[in-house]
Amino acid sequence: MIERRQAHPGSTVTAVPGDLGWHLAMVLRGYQTRFEDAVDQMPAGIRGFQVLSAVVHKDPPNQQALGAHLAIDRTVLTYLLDTLVAAGVVERVPDPADRRARKIIATDSGRDILAACEERVAAAEADLLAGLEREDAQTIRILIGQLARNVHRAQPGASPCEAMDNL
C-alpha cells in the first residue's frame, strides 16, 4: 500500500517505489556540498575531518581500529594519516598495549582545527535542515541514525565513501 501524507495544506505527496533512493541522493548531495565548504580548511578535506573527529571523539585504540571504524582501507588510511601528520593535526604514537601497533592522537592544533570545523559543520547541517520544523529536523536526524546503524550492522564492511563515488 502506498502511503499518502499531507506535506503542506492542500497538497498530497505520493510515495513511489524508487523515490527513496532519489531523495536520499539529493539530500546527500546537498549535505556533501555544505560539508565540503565547512571543512575546507581541514587537511585532506572531508576524510581528514572524519579521521580527526573519530580520533578525538571515539578514541580508537590503534590505527587498525581507526581504519575499521571508518571503513577505510589500511593503505588509504596510511596515506591519509601521512597527510594529517605532515599538517601537524595528528601524531602516531606507540600503542601501549602493543608496541608493534600505533595509536593516533590529535595534537592541540588538530583539536583547534576540529573545533572550528565542527562549528561550521553544525551551521551547514542547520542550513540543510532549515526548511523543517525543529522537531522534524531532530526526528530526521534520529531516524537516519537508526537507519545507518541498521545498514552498518547488515553490511559491516560496506564503505560509505564507495557509495558516494557511485552516486
Image (tube, helix red, strand yellow):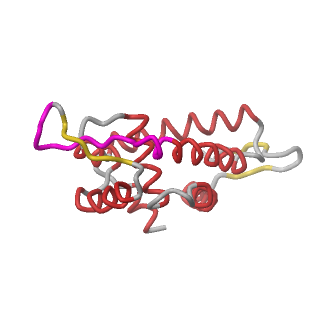
Of the pair 99 and 156, the residue shown nearer to us: 99
| Residue 163 in picture, x, y percent from top left | 42, 61
User: Would you place residue 72 above or below residue 152 in this image?
Assistant: below
Q: Tell me the quarter of the picture where residue 107 sits.
A: top left
157 lies above or below 146: below
| 73 magenta-colored | no
Q: Residue furthest right?
A: 10
Q: Position of residue 23 (x, y in %)?
A: 61, 57
Q: Looking at the figure, which quarter contains the N terminus?
A: top right
Position of residue 130 in the picture relative to residue 113 (left or right): right
* Location of residue 92 with respect to 22 vertically, above or below: above
Q: Is residue 139 left or right of residue 134?
A: left
Looking at the picture, how far across and down is residue 32, in whole percent? 57, 59
Residue 31, image x, y percentages: 61, 55
Question: Toward the viewer: 41 or 18?
Answer: 41
Residue 18 appears anywhere in the view: no
Q: Residue at x 30, y 36 (%)?
A: 60
Which secondary structure is most common in the magenta stretch? strand
Q: How many marks?
A: 0
Q: Residue at x 41, y 58 (%)?
A: 87
- The segment highlighted magenta reads 97-111
Q: Residue at x 43, y 56 (%)?
A: 47
| Residue found 46% across the figure and 59% down from its top | 43
Magenta span includes 108: yes
The outermost residue toward the bottom is 166
The picture quadrant where one finds residue 97 is top left
Q: Nearer the viewer, residue 8 or 10?
A: 8
Residue 3 makes an appearance in the image? yes
